[in-house]
Amino acid sequence: MIFTEIAPAEFTKFAQKSPYKSFMQTEEIAKLREQNGWTVYYFGVKENDRLIAASLIVAKPTFLGKSTFIAPGGPLLDYDDAKLVEFFFKNLRNYIKTHNGYVLQISPYYELIERDRDGAPVEKGFNHKRALQNLQSVGFIKESHPSQPEYMFAMDIASRTPDEILADFKRNTRNHVRKAERAGVKIRELTREELPLFKQITESTSERRHFSDRPLSYYEQMYDLFHEKGQVKFLVAEVDSQILSAAMFMLYGDEIVYLFSGSDEKYMKEYNAQYLIQWHIIKYAAEHGFKRYNFYGISGLPKNGDLDGIYEFKKGFDTKHGKVLEYIGTFELPVNKALYHFHRMLSRIKH
């Protein structure tokens, strides 16, 4: 095996065919990071002149002049292959060490345990606990605050018609969709110039629900990088020009990912517009050959049968084909151990 830097085009060709692909591992995200001061690298492992692993890596000085290296949504490799994991990260660690880095953070789009709609392990389903062992044996430390959700909810839509999918909605969910349609709620896609309208909705929602929102510049950059390729959609649900709800979706590979959203609290119960936006994009996914619709993050697995409101909302859209996705998480590999642990100690004191 050979560890080497690779060209962006070579990386993209590999990434598009990878079973672990994510929109976070794309040249567009590399450009987004570059626009925000990060340095971009592409690395790969070749065997018999064929790529068997690859990753977009970004780096930026973050602590005492030393750089954090990050593989957003990656790297793209088989984490159950102990030999490959050791070879890739041993070489990457050495590269980082000689290029002013002190830590590597990864967040692979790699599932851990196959689970059903209720979050229970699937009998005879896959279990990639070996992947965790392989990462830990290299020296990775699992982070308690992951950079991407460890649990998501998704629905398989391959070879299903919109009518079949709608029939599998929970009754209340289907009723909410129909209520919004009867009320005259319409769905449309925003132009770039209208993104401040999207930001208004997400900002007010983030303040109400106490989570951090992205700046308007982020949404504009994502539009500029992905919209021409048809890989991002900013949708709003409105009635008589009044925006009721808004959502951002990424369309990459064979899945659509529901990323950010917000709703005007005054109209949520009256119009249920947030349900109609979901039905609109799910129907779009089915009609355009996507295999999976990913509702993205949920707070975790159900405890004693209890669901949080977000999980309950998402679960209502598929009573038969929905499933919980559990990912292996976010990990950090100390490169300069003294500096890494000093930084962690300061972070704990700060918090």
Image (spheres, rainbow, N blue to C red):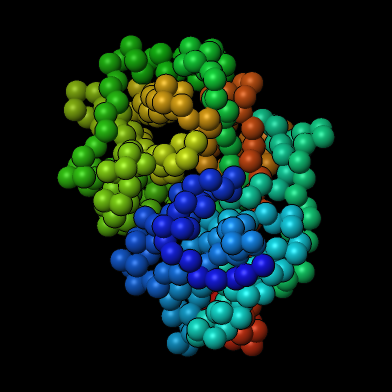
Q: For this rendering, which residue is in front, 116 or 228?
A: 228
Which residue occupies 53% across, 45% down?
A: 17
Image-based side of 41 in relation to 266, left or right: right
Q: How far from the left and from the top, in percent, is residue 342?
A: 60, 85
| Vertical order, 86 against 177 (above or below) | below
Residue 93 is left or right of residue 189, and the answer is: right
Residue toward you, 228 or 316: 228
Residue 348 visible, this orientation: no
Residue visible at 37% across and 64% down in the picture: 33
**Residue in the image at 29% along x and 55% along y:** 221
What x and y, as percent, mark residue 136? 74, 67
Q: How many marks?
A: 0
19 lies above or below 12: above
Residue 159 in which image quadrant: top right
Q: Nearer the viewer, residue 237 or 308?
A: 237
The residue that appears at 56% across and 64% down in the rendered structure is 44
Q: Position of residue 130 (x, y in %)?
A: 79, 55
Furthest toward the right, the residue is 124
In front of the other: 96 or 216: 96
Can residue 43 be seen here? yes
